Amino acid sequence: MQIHTAHFDISAPDLDSCPAPELPEFAFIGRSNVGKSSLINAITNQRKPLADVSKTPGRTQMINFFRINNKWHLVDLPGYGYAKVSGKKKDKFNEFVSDYLLNRENLVCVFQLIDSRHTPQKLDLQFSQWLMEAGIPFVLAFTKSDKMKMGAVNRHAEAYHLAMGEFCEGLPRTIITSADNGLGRKDILTFIQAAIDAQG
Ligand code: GDP
């Protein structure tokens, strides 16, 4: 897939404020600092970085919609696992994201981003398990792979798969990425194109 046009549509503070469910949606989520904005900017390859929008004050906790080629929405979800927010705020935030994930009718697939520099982290595994149990299709995208030797990246991905074996049979599609050198960009776009085509 070539990216012809990509622009910011809207930030939504709750499910009711999301755009009409007309376009297939592909959502990106991960822990804060996982490299989500960088990956979104690498995928969409715009001169003016798209995902800066989601870093503007007031929008970090919102769902941000980007319209790609007028054909699909790239959906930037708030990061999970903010250590700094209070318990109450965290609950509300989780509720909003889970509301979107569980109820958005045109959501096709979630890309769960995982920092490839680390051994399996509990918070990531918990989220994978939650997606699995909710029956939400997802892809694992390991980020920042350029920061490590590829052998270590693969070992971390394998360890993650092994840990997932505790709660699931079969494994999600896994893509190794780097916003720095573009690794995985083509695979992600090819996957999205195939998923759109499969919908007819
Ligand atoms: P976000 O909070 O998940 O949106 O993360 P950012 O995209 O802002 O990235 C967090 C930090 O990691 C920034 O300093 C980025 O420059 C860096 N980073 C993100 N992706 C990559 C990558 O693929 N390679 C390298 N080397 N650094 C990255």
Image (cartoon, rainbow, N blue to C red):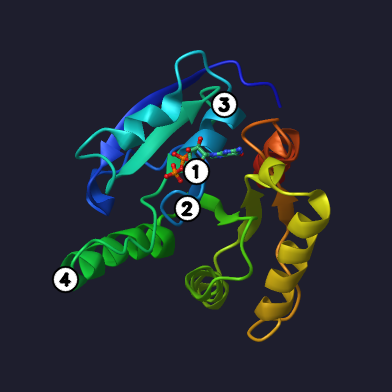
Residue 74 position, x and y percent, is: 49, 37
Displayed quadrant of residue 83: bottom left
Which secondary structure, mark 1?
helix
Query: Which secondary structure, mark 2?
Result: strand
Asked if residue 97 lies left or right of residue 71, the reply is left
Q: Name which of mark 3 and mark 2 comes first in the sequence.
A: 2
Is disc 3's CB within 8 Å of ligand 1?
A: no
User: Which of the marked residues, 4 or 1, is nearer the chain's N terminus?
Assistant: 1
Q: Rounded to the nearest whole Å, what is the CA distance between mark 2 and mark 4?
A: 21 Å
Name the N-terminal-most of marks 1 and 3: 1
User: According to the image, label 1 marks what residue?
Assistant: 36
Residue where numbered disc 2 is placed: 29
- State how far apart marks 1 and 3 are (Cα): 12 Å
* Mark 3 lies on residue: 44
Q: Which residue is mark 4?
A: 88
Q: Residue at x 25, y 39 (%)?
A: 59
Q: Residues within 10 Å of mark 4 (few under 14, many from 20)?
A: few
Q: Nearer the viewer, mark 4 or mark 3?
A: 4
User: Looking at the picture, how far across and down is residue 1, in whole percent?
Assistant: 71, 27
